[in-house]
Amino acid sequence: MVEYAFSARPPVGRSLAEPSPLLPRFIRLRDAPSYLGMDKNRFNRDVRPTLAAIPIGTQGIAFDRLDLDSWADDYKSRNGHPAAQPEREKLWETKERRASPNEVGSGTSISSSEEHAFAKALEQATSGRPKSISRSA
């Protein structure tokens, strides 16, 4: 019964529209690690010491499903991270953008020096004779 609770597909002959069986309140030791999505060694090391074991019969051990859910919620709050955003969205969210390309900002304008350098290069390219290269800035 627990097997179907963790499966994304219903058993043969059942559709997703049919109501699923209820999850049991007590989950046996053999099923508890898969309920939390981990292997039995990690379950025994990290989870089992924090939970109350419920004896079933003479040898069976189970755990309360609500206690397992509570442990999972606590673990998630301590160790969870927000989902990673695609790189494109990250850049948009973190990079500050100007409201307008004509917006005045602080800093030194370099457009006049660039225009002067372009005019000088254009003059040299269109003149018929080569000019000497000056070392002045």
Image (cartoon, rainbow, N blue to C red):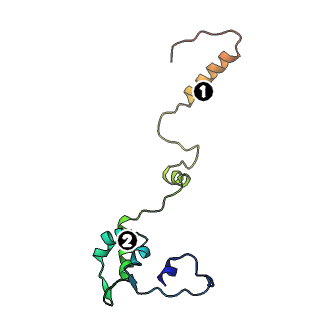
Q: Is residue 86 above or below residue 20?
A: above
* Residue 2 point in image, percent of width and height: 47, 82
Q: Residue 33, labelled with which disc? A: none
Q: In which quarter of the image is residue 18?
A: bottom right
- Residue in the picture at 47% in, 37% down: 107
- The reply, left or right, for residue 48 in relation to residue 22 is left
Give whichever of 52, 88 is nearer the camera.
52
- The number of numbered badges drawn on the structure is 2
Badge nearest the viewer, 1 or 2: 2
- The reply, left or right, for residue 42 in relation to residue 86 is left
Identify which amino acid the numbered label 1 is placed on.
Glu
User: Which residue, as the protein is rendered here, is positioned at the far bottom?
Assistant: 57
Per the image, label 2 sits on a secondary structure element best described as helix
Could you tell me how far apart the alpha carbons at marks 1 and 2 are, in whole angstroms? 71 Å
Contact, CB < 8 Å: mark 1 with mark 2? no
* Residue 67 point in image, percent of width and height: 35, 80
Identify which amino acid the numbered label 2 is placed on.
Lys
Give whichever of 61, 94 is nearer the camera.
61
- Residue in the picture at 66% in, 17% down: 123
- Check disc 2 and report the residue beneath it: 40
- Check disc 1 and report the residue beneath it: 115
* Residue 62 point in image, percent of width and height: 35, 83
Q: Which of marks 1 and 2 is nearer the N terminus?
A: 2
- Residue in the picture at 48% in, 62% down: 83
* Residue 54 point in image, percent of width and height: 31, 86
- The reply, left or right, for residue 52 in relation to residue 119 is left
Classed neighbour count for the residue bearing mark 1: other residues with Cα under 10 Å, few (<14), some (14–19), many (≥20) = few
